[in-house]
Amino acid sequence: MNRTWWKEAVIYQIYPRSFMDSNGDGIGDLPGIISQLDYLVYLGVDVLWLSPIFQSPNDDNGYDISDYRQILPEYGTMADFERLLHEAHQCGLKVLLDIVVNHTSDEHPWFVHSRSSKDNPYRNFYFWQPTPPNNWQSFFGGSAWQHDPLTDEYYLHLFSRKQPDLNWENPQVRREIFRTMRFWLDKGVDGFRLDVIPLISKRTDWPNGDANDLMRTICEVYANGPHVHEYLQEMHREVFAHYDALALGEGIGISPKNCLDYVGQDRHELHLLYHFDHMFLNFGPGGRFDPIQWQLTDFKAIFHRWDQAIGQQGWINIVLDNHDFPRMVSRFGDDGAYHQASAKLLATLLLTMRGTPCIYQGSELGMTNATWHSLDELRDIEAHNAWKAWQQQGGTLDAFLQAAAVNGRDNARTPMQWSDAHAAGFTTGTPWIKVHENYPTLNAQKALADSDSIFHYYRHLLALRKSHPTLIYGDYLPLRAHDAQLFAYERADADGHYLVLLNFSSTPCEVADLVPAEYRWLLGNYPMPPDARDELRPWEARLLEIAS
């Protein structure tokens, strides 16, 4: 297997709007990120992924770009970004930019020109039809076709109506996108997180999707289009082949069956991707706002299936939460009685699995989902659109807010909790979205002062991962696949042999049959027992080195 910096790195995702505000306007910014670089270095991460910082009207919090080469003024200036890049590099941190190339804002000059007339040179930068050619639905609800009275035609938007999809079949579109990517790489950025990249090639025979199953439509119709690999290989030739830069793809719609088509090391497309199989695990038939119970056996099977599919030829990003999903301790752990233990257990999973881990801001503190008391507290366009559909089906507001508290995207967007000061130390002003009520007791200041905190557990795990390469490159060997309580696996290669034991429950779990007589205790989220073959305590995690 090829060994590279991006396989050995740990990524830390920053949602700039909610990370740190430097000027009191209630919105996180680039100088705020700069002010916390020492914190990130101390944590021990290697790469900063910045969610979009480009000019945007913020219909979808920056994932609707109106100028790819300008910084959103709320976040700062180009000089601020260049200082951030320089200081991050001085600290030994690399920087990834989150770039959206499937669609733009409807306020981007390309679309402003495109919609102005049917014969405008930019008309073919987007998809226009006299009438909707199919039943495609937007990810955010409603039809994916929006009527535009200026030319009496419809344009395609797989996301909000203010996010028209680019027509990658037009070579000029591709040239402009590649030119933009080179602009940022020439400034020194270390790569890109490529938003919804499997969607860039459209089925222009315009088949209908399954009106009752959006997830099936995404996989079978929206993603993996007829020219997607041709476009990604062109992107590699025109962009990434000329830089030591990372191409990280958001892998929506990609399955274990076709993942190597995207990240196989002989494909020259993406370097790694993250998939959504476990992230959609508790989505019911109605999607995000129809949560269902998930089973540990299914969760484990997903990790095993993907590891087998990737094999020695590809690589993936390991994530348990991000800006689009709930807080991982609230979703996969226990954010009540076993909050600290389960947050550390999930950290153990994240940082001992084969792949490049990504820590979402605040996970290292154990930040949790919020409680939403009114619709006015929610900021996410997806939530507000979902509420309209919910109302039409006769649902109550209380039930909707409860569903939002389980799976809503705003759960991950509440401000970073730095201290017990006003607004959790995030801002001296009024934050753009409410601060979680638990910030007085759950914050970075308290975590740094407590040697037994979730934060310091992450630090120790990150150091262990760096000093034990088998935890990066070693084979993944699952154990007790059908156990509904225990997630256990080995990591092994010629350089080492490790055993990971994770009790995903609040009841003790027997593990004596899995632990050999000769072992060395490396880390655990409870005090070390007299014998590691003892039963696991509630939400206990153990990392053991096995004698060869």
Image: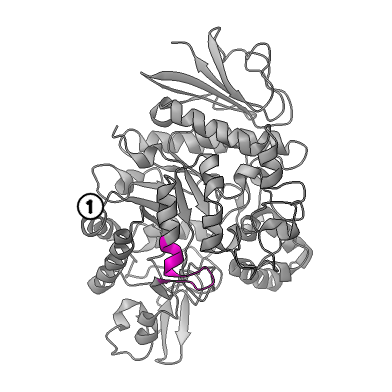
Location of the N terminus by quadrant is: top left
Q: Residue furthest top?
A: 517
Left or right: residue 143 compared with residue 264: right
The structure residue drawn at horizontal position 51% and vertical position 25%, both measured from the top left corner, is: 489
Q: Is 329 within the magenta? A: no
Residue 254: in sight, yes or no?
no
Magenta residues (range): 70-82
Residue 228: in sight, yes or no?
yes
- In the figure, 123 relative to 414: above or below? below
Q: How many marks?
A: 1
The structure residue drawn at horizontal position 38% and vertical position 68%, both measured from the top left corner, is: 207
Left or right: residue 536 compared with residue 96: right
- In the figure, 410 relative to 438: above or below? below
Between 254 and 51, the one lying in front of the other is 51
- In the figure, 105 relative to 181: above or below? below
**Residue linked to disc 1:** 241
Crowd band around label 1 with a 10 angstrom C-alpha radius: few (<14), some (14–19), many (20+): some
Residue type at the position of mark 1? Ala
The structure residue drawn at horizontal position 61% and vertical position 45%, both measured from the top left corner, is: 363
Where residue 515 appears, x then y in whole percent? 57, 14
Q: Is 71 within the magenta? A: yes
